[in-house]
Amino acid sequence: MITHKLTGNAFQLAICQLEPGQVVYAEPGKFVWKTQNVGVETRLVASSSAQGGDAGQGGSGLLKKAIDIGKRAVAGEHLAFQYFSAVGGNGLLGLAGVVPGELRALELDGTRGWYTEKSTLVGAESSVNFDISFAGIRRGIRGGTGFVLEHFTGSGTLFIAAAGNFIELNPAKYGGKIQVHAGCLVAFEDTLTYGVERIGGLSAQTAMTAMFGAEGINLATLEGDGTVLLQSMSLEALANSLHPYLPSSGDESKPGLGNLF
């Protein structure tokens, strides 16, 4: 496990202490700062391939790398990770999300994995395996947030980010099933069953909900016994709140964020 400290309030930062031999991989854009003895390397390979050394050695390693890169391309993800390791003693590494909100460190012990939404990953220990999971096109379209989930297994520390604050729930405490706004879903343990459910049948009321209720007529559903992590603000809501202040092409009537103060 990675020794770490979460700091900050509205925009949290994870400060990781890397011991010799420990490696953390992160999504591009999540790195903030490091001590000079922490090296960084960008690799076109998923973490699960890197645990045994150079994944590029041998035909099977090249095939695995190609499959990993292909999955990330189809999912619309970055095609590479940044890898950080300390040389000559302990080093410090700072990572953060890209929107105001909380960070959470999940400690995987090999018995349960986690599914996360896209862009949730901040960083993870190299002993945490990364994979892309496809939830199904129909389910993804109905859910409104795409059909791609990231799946983390193995043992080690996983850092994820949310917009706003985390909300932690277990469906087992609420009759075994909960319905959530798809845009507020951040992560859930892989012991749970994920689905998308229509609110009611086709009627004038469901049409009103779809047109004016913001969340539409479909909700994500989580069933079983396990932890679900939600974010108090969806990225769509955050984008909509900023949109009136963003100048459009050829329109100088909007003030722009730089002129608000």
Image (cartoon, helix red, strand yellow):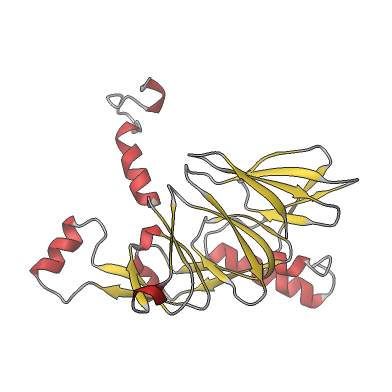
Comparing 75 with 101, the one in front is 101
Figure quadrant of the N terminus: bottom right
Report the residue at 44% width, 69% height from top.
Answer: 147
Using the rendered view, name the quadrant where residue 143 is placed.
bottom left
Report the residue at 81% width, 37% height from top.
Answer: 36
Comparing 171 with 136, the one in front is 171
Location of residue 180 in the rendering, given as x and y in whole percent from the top left corner: 34, 65
Decide if residue 81 is in sight here: no
Report the residue at 54% width, 73% height from top.
Answer: 133
Location of residue 140 in the rendering, given as x and y in whole percent from the top left corner: 39, 70
In the displayed orientation, state which residue is furthest to the left.
Answer: 204
Using the rendered view, name the quadrant where residue 260 is placed.
top left
Decide if residue 190 is in sight here: yes
Q: Is residue 195 above or below residue 78?
A: below
Asked if residue 167 lies left or right of residue 4, the reply is left
Report the residue at 81% width, 67% height from top.
Answer: 56
Using the rendered view, name the quadrant where residue 73 is placed.
bottom right
Asked if residue 91 lies left or right of residue 222, the reply is right
Comparing 171 with 201, the one in front is 171
